[in-house]
Amino acid sequence: MSALDNVIIPKKELPANVVRLGWILTLAGLALAVLSYMTDANRAAFNNVIGFTFLASIAVGAVFFIALEYIAGAVWTTPFRRVLEFLGMLLIPTLLMAIPLFFKLHDVYHWTHADAVATDKILQAKAPYLNEMSFMTRFVIFMVLWLAFYFIFRQNSLKQDGNKDQKLTKKNIALAAAFIPVLAISISLFSIDWLMSLEPHWFSTMFGVYYFTGTILTALAVTTYFVVSLSQKGYFFKGINENHYYSFGALMFGLLSFWAYIAFSQFMLIWYANLPEENFWYIERWQHGWEYVSIAITLIHFWIPYFMLVSRPSKMNPANLKRMAALLVFAHFLDLYWLVMPTYNNAPVFGYHELAFPVLCIGLIIVFFALQAKRFNLVPVGDPKLQRGIDFHL
């Protein structure tokens, strides 16, 4: 019997209690978000930015890893690529979550105020880029490009399940080669628009890489959590082994180390130069209680997962992988909170306003994944690399 005989061919729905939990969280998060907008629209809008950029991280990061597998000719990820394809569908709710923000741009972004621009030379210099029309145009272009690439990747992969045509793999390889540079530019500008421009007088040439690294790390963490959980429930081939788990753990370990390197390098260069137009941003995050959030980020976004994943056995332990994946997802949300909320308030705030969007995002992730798992096979059974992926050993 070949390993392919052990692949789950029929579509297999997720357990009813998981689907039910997803819908409960989605509806609860949506209700809290609506209540938040009704009671304090400005605070809700800032939290909306966090939720929107968080969901975008998972969706765009998933599409990046799909492209990376094709262009690199990776084998070990092939049996799990469908998980990434399902997560990429989160681009749809990401787009919907951005819509309320276009009605609150003036309350969130200082550069949208004409009177402020008229008396500020820095904002005047940035006005050709930072203006509402170009802001919205860029967003539309980014979303169209991301959705177009994603749906072509997905369509070719799903079609291959039936006809097993290897030409579809070649098409996706060529598509991936075009997508990577598009993503590099678009994700950098996306982070500048939605996050860095919250403080329009501040700038960092490393910010785009900072957000991109957090994006792909979070997408990998969500994927790892799904893969391990589904494997434990028997949703994948029977031959999944420690080599597959180790690859997920090693990649998470490498990316969290790279994120720490970028984060520290950005801070170190600004601290060393000590220029007022740069250092005020970090000073704001080291007073009035934000220093505790800053310390928490260094601990849960780097030190704890670093030591919990540094050894080889820890990378092969499914329970440890799930714990670290969940921790890194939470760390990214906290990181976005740290990036966004000091613009709203000079001290950390926490209440149901801050709970609304993380609850909504978690619910949407579960619901969108479950809806697709009901319709499509969890394994890309037509991919020519599938057998080698199943037999993968280090």
Image (cartoon, rainbow, N blue to C red):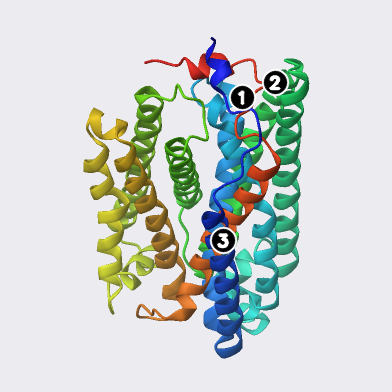
- Please identify the residue farthest to the top as the structure is shown: 1
Kindly identify the amino acid type of the residue bearing the numbered disc 2: Thr
Kindly identify the amino acid type of the residue bearing the numbered disc 1: Tyr
User: Looking at the image, which residue is at 54% across and 51% down?
Assistant: 57
Q: Is residue 132 left or right of residue 327?
A: right
Marks 2 and 3, how far apart in space?
Answer: 36 Å
- Closest to the observer, 276 or 260: 260
Say whether disc 1 or disc 2 marks the residue closer to the N-terminus.
1
Marks 3 and 1, how far apart in space?
Answer: 34 Å
The residue indicated by pointer 1 is 70
The image quarter in which residue 229 lies = top left
The residue indicated by pointer 2 is 169
Kindly identify the amino acid type of the residue bearing the numbered disc 3: Arg
Judge the density around disc 1: few (<14), some (14-19), many (≥20) Cα neighbours within 10 Å.
many
User: Looking at the image, which residue is at 75% across and 56% down?
Assistant: 140
Say whether disc 2 or disc 3 marks the residue closer to the N-terminus.
3
In this rendering, the answer to whether 219 lies above or below 333 is above
Label placed on residue 20: 3
Q: Is residue 233 visible?
A: yes
